[in-house]
Amino acid sequence: MSRKIFISYRRSDSADFSVALYNELRGYYDESFIFKDINTIQPGQQFAEVLENALDHCAVVLVVIGPTWLTVSGARLFEEHDWVRQEIARALARNLRVIPILANGTKMPKTEELPDDLHGLCKRQALEIDNQRFEYDVAQLCRAIQDLVPSKKRRVAPAGSSYWDNAFKAILLLFMLASIGLIVWAWLGSEGQFTEKITMSLLGLGGMAGGWAAFTRQRWIELRAHQIE
C-alpha cells in the first residue's frame, strides 16, 4: 500500500522552506516515508526513473508554492520536460491527494496561469504554512493526511518548550489569583465608596476572564499541535 509523502518544489523558489518542511515532517514520519529529491536520490541514479517510482508509491503530494513560483519560474511550467510540471501532472493524473502548500502568504495560482495538465491543481484545497506558526501548521497538515499516511511516531516537543509553557501557565494562574484577591480586598479590606468597590470588582473580574481565556487558548493550541499519533 502506498503511504509515502512526496514534496514537490522549485529550488529557486522555496528550497529553504522545503528543507524546513522536510525536517519538520521527520518529527512525525520515518525518513523513508518522505520523498524530497536532494535527500532521496542517490548519486548515479536516473532522475526520471526515481521520480516515477516515487510517485508510484506515494499517497500524498505536497506542492510547495512560494512567492516566486510563478513570477520567476512560471514560464518553465509551460515547458514540456520541466520536472516540477511533470511531478504535479503525473500526480494529478494518478488522482493522488495533491495539496498545494502556500508558503508564507503566497496566493494560489489562477487556472489561466498554468498549463492545461496542471489546471486540476486549482481544484485542490490548499493549505497555508507560515513561518510564524510553522510547527502548528505542519501539525494540521499531518492531521489532515493521517487517513492516508498514519504517523509512525509522536512528535517530540522542542527542548525547553515544556518549561516555557508551564512558566506561562504559572504566570496566568498568579494573575488570576491576583484578580480574585482584588475583588476580595475591595469588599473586605477596602474603605472606599460603593462605586469604587464596584470598579475594583469589575477590574478583578476582567482580569480573571482575560487570564482564563489566555489559559484556555494556550491549552487548545497544545492539544491541537500534539494530537497527531
Image: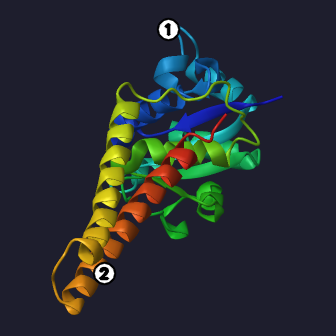
Q: Residues within 10 Å of mark 1 (few under 14, many from 20)?
A: few
* Mark seen at residue 43: 1
Residue sitting at 38 percent across and 40 percent down? Answer: 165
State the residue position of label 2: 202
Q: State the image coordinates of residue 206 (x, y, percent, origin top left).
A: 33, 74
Residues at discs 1 and 2 in contact (Cβ within 8 Å): no
Q: Does residue 67 appear anywhere in the picture? A: no
Most distant residue in the left direction: 192
Residue sitting at 61 percent across and 26 percent down? Answer: 29
Secondary structure beneath disc 2? helix
Q: Amino acid at mark 2?
A: Leu
Q: State the image coordinates of residue 136 (x, y, percent, origin top left).
A: 47, 46
Q: Amino acid at mark 1?
A: Pro
Looking at the rendered image, the quarter that the C terminus falls into is top right
Q: Is residue 54 left or right of residue 220?
A: right
Looking at the rendered image, the quarter that the N terminus falls into is top right
Most distant residue in the top direction: 44
* Mark seen at residue 3: none
Q: State the image coordinates of residue 180 (x, y, percent, origin top left).
A: 34, 65
Q: Is residue 23 left or right of residue 211?
A: right
Tell me which numbered mark, 1 or 2, is placed earlier along the sequence.
1
Q: CA distance from mark 1 to mark 2?
A: 69 Å
Camera-side residue of 223 and 67: 223
